[in-house]
Amino acid sequence: MSEKNKYSDAELEEFKEIIHSKLIQANADYDLLRKAITQSDENDIADTSPTFKVLEEGAAVLSKEEVGRLAQRQVKFIQSLQAALVRIENKTYGICRETGKLIPKERLRAVPHATLSIEAKQKQK
């Protein structure tokens, strides 16, 4: 019996649905992060003492930097999910880019944007 080298259209449709739901959630999360960065109607520190004002401003800068990093990671995740949808359309989804073998369904359900099998990922380390 020969080894399967690509997923069926029905299987690809299942993965497409998983990716679409993750994409909706990822975009919603990104919108929240973007709003947190640009939010200007938050409680102001104008009525606090100068010492607390400096501390608050420092904390706000650190917080915005962290939120910015999270937003960048979210954008990268969204792009990975979109690339996975392109691979589904090209019918190359689920094929390990290192080994050329199918990535197990369990891995793709957990990490739908995966391009490497566990075997190939472990070899990279």
Image (tube, rainbow, N blue to C red):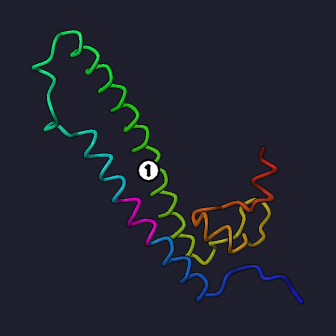
Secondary structure under tag 1 reads: helix
Image position of 101 (left or right of 41): right
* Range shown magenta: 21-27
Q: Residues within 10 Å of mark 1 (few under 14, many from 20)?
A: some
Tell me the residue at 49%/70% (across/down): 19
The quadrant where residue 66 appears: top left
Please tell me whether residue 87 belongs to the stretch shown in magenta: no
Q: In front: 8, or 43?
A: 43
Looking at the rendered structure, the kind of residue marked 1 is Gln
Furthest-left residue in view? 47
- Image height of 19 relative to 68, above or below: below
Image position of 84 (left or right of 72): right
- Image height of 7 relative to 92, above or below: below
Q: Position of residue 86 (x, y in %)?
A: 51, 70
- Image height of 108 relative to 10, above or below: above
Q: Position of residue 3 (x, y in %)?
A: 84, 82
The quadrant where residue 63 appears: top left
